[in-house]
Amino acid sequence: MAPSPRPGLWPALLSALFGLIGLALFGGGLWLATLGGSAYYVICGAALLVTAGLLYRRSAASLWVYSVLLLGTMAWAVQEVGLDFWALAPRGDVLVPLGILLLLPFVTRSLGARASTTLPLAASLGVAAVVVLVSLTQDPQDIAGQLPQVSANAPTPADADDQPDEDWHAYGRTQFGDRFSPLKQVNASNVGRLKVAWVFRTHDLKGPNDPGEITDEVTPIKVRDTLYLCSPHQILWALDAATGKLKWKFDPKLVYNAGFQHMTCRGVSYHETKADAQTIDGTPAPDDCAHRIFLPTNDGRMFALNADTGERCHGFANDGELNLQTNMPVTTVGMYEPTSPPVVTDKILVVSGAVTDNYSTHEPSGVTRGYDVYTGKLVWSFDTGNPDPNQAPSPDHKYTPNSPNVWITASYDPKLNMVYLPTGVQTPDIWGGNRTPDMERYASSIVALDADTGKLAWSYQTVHHDLWDMDIPSQPSLIDIHRDDGTVVPALYAPAKTGNIFVLDRRTGTPIVGAPETPVPQGAAPGDHLSPTQPFSDLTFRPKAKLTDADMWGATMFDELACRIIFKRLRYDGPFTPPSLQGTLVFPGNLGMFEWGGLAVDPQRQIAIANPIAIPFVSRLIPRGPGNPANPPTGAGGTGGESGVQPQYGVPYGVTLNPLLSPIGIPCKEPGWGFIAGVDLKTNTIVWKHRNGTTRDSSPIPVGFKVGVPSLGGPLVTAGNIAFLTATLDRYIRAYDVTTGKTLWEDRLPAGGQSTPMTYAVGGKQFIVTADGGHGSFGTKLGDYIIAYSLPDEAH
């Protein structure tokens, strides 16, 4: 037998390259196949090894084998993910360039290939090109549509009050939490001409004693000619609304350390004394603070300040300072953090706060309290874990440790005099074998209270025995739905981390949109239990089907394969797969499809704008043992964050919580990871949905691929048919046509915009304001910017 011809330089080099790639894919593919995943990588690896052998022999048949591999890969890829470019990309971003390399003249000459031999490979590359070009013209994840316009007989918003159109008096403009402004000077026809009007810098930046979870999430409020906002260390700033010039500031001298789980201030609240106002005790309201600002601080205090001067309201609590640690079972600084602005009624200041997640079984209470708005005197309490939630504190009674808390702003309907609390779960969050029925009944719920007394009106639970931290993460939005038959339903829309939007009659808590109880995966960790069913709202952004290994992704086919292996090694049976020692895929992830930004609702058009996200997480229970003690070490503080190792002292397991990432640190689930969407509230349907945001600030190269990126923060909607959003992982403020979702304008921000924008007018000029200070754990650039945009004078 004649000896095999010696390979030339290029065939030898290519043979080695194809062989190495083939071995990697074949070996990884075998691992994946044994886990029950796709067998494609085994076949692909084998075909590459055959190609490598033929290249070594300088055989032109290598081109035939490779052309078959390419055609098979295209067929497999389209069958798995359809014509979605970003899902297809890693399935061909290695093989297609290798195919092009094989067709280069110096390679084909060294193989002695004729034109007829290269034609099949050229044709297969042509097929791949057609697939790519077609996929670039469509997006299977996109929903196109048009939201309804304002009707001639548009309803008057139910929260219409004496607030001037040009003001923004509360976190959500009103305490209905709609984040809607009737201003329309800036509209779809001129929004492209917005320019920076002024910039204010707080110089409140991350210090050496701050946690990683330092964020600037504030939505300013505007009353008359003044803008009020707080910065991460809860410094209160009063700015001239027309110019951004500082009027005054108040520094609470915050006590803080790196063990705090949060360092943020989402906003402040405003109250104005009305004629003949009285305290709860029936005495005339003090007149030293006719206009007051309430400022919560992360070390467990509440300040009442004169809105005109910044001086303390001396008649409120202790010289304007209320100690929220009073009667708490644990008073460690930073364990109880009121990060969001309180609800303010004519009589009552309703105060809630965040409790450190997943630290221990001995933490502060999640109690919500009602104080006299003028004096700071405690009027009522609602302690979600107490058998009698209204039990008053006394010398022998403190609030219940670890009871479910309310960490985001509540909503308030003054006509019904009801306050609507979005509750969390008893911490530790990821194991619940020790929870009592009293601790469970109001967890992960909407709880409606009488604002004057704190008595329960109704409650509705959105997750039973929550082991995933799938709470209600945002302020519920209140809107009166005007049906075509002439009836009016006072509704509450509560977006949940699960992606469900629960729609309730806010008078009774009765679902308006169906949320049937549906069987969910079982098999709890030892010592725990599960609810056999969970409510699934018919209005939802949650995935319609379970993830499979076909939904895994990567920058290349190598890390995509790695993500498939990671996925198949985890426990995953769909939504509500229980935590496990094996490691559980949680999707929607612990970050949630909805976070604290909530919805923006136009009550006249009866529509909502949302920015859902889709990032899976992995939770893994860690049994007690060496390095994982059951009790905290002496002097231990908080974890300084919500991801990574969480100790859960006092229960049988610690837990690790992390996003599902590839070995090179990008999401394992295929994009999109973030969207902007429009919802018709009369029909409760998602009318349009588009990928939102680019990779500009999160990829190794500063290229803005529009894959749809995660966002933290919420949208603003105006009567000018414009929605604004800044929350994305890339540093932009964007304006969207509310009717279609089309992006109309964007501007580059100097730091991350993980906040919710607001708008107001002064002297006939409309401003859009955004706080851009970044987010430590989200990974965006930190800063200290407050930026106002307006139209040039000639564009009004």
Image (cartoon, rainbow, N blue to C red):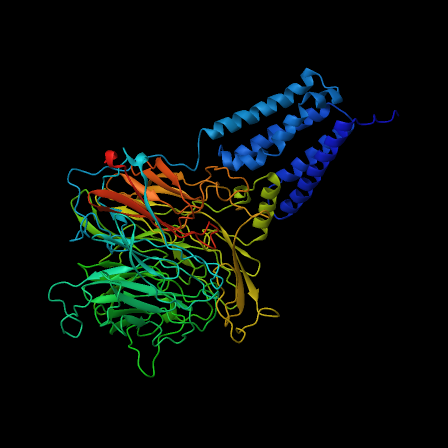
**Residue 630, how many percent across, how many down?**
54, 73
Quadrant in which the N terminus appears: top right
Q: Who's the residue at 60% across and 28% down the image?
A: 71
Residue 760: percent from left, percent from top: 25, 47
712 or 166, which is in the foreground? 166
Q: Is residue 449 left or right of residue 668?
A: left
Q: Is residue 589 left or right of residue 274?
A: right
At which x and y percent is residue 544?
43, 45
Residue 333 visible (yes or no): yes
Which residue extends farthest left? 276
| Residue 248 left/right relative to 262 | left
Outermost right residue: 1
- Work out whether 12 lies above or below 677: above
**Res. 607 visible in picture:** no
Q: Quadrant of residue 126?
A: top right
Query: Which quadrant: the C terminus?
Result: top left
Give how far across and how far down residue 774 sits, in percent: 43, 51
**Toward which corner of the image does residue 234 lie, by quadrant?**
bottom left
Q: Is residue 534 above or below residue 135?
A: below
In the rendered structure, the answer to whether residue 446 lies left or right of residue 614 reads: left
| Residue projecting furthest to the bottom | 396
In this view of the protein, which residue sits in the foreground, 686 or 190? 190
Indicate whether 125 appears above or below 353. above
Count the marks: 0
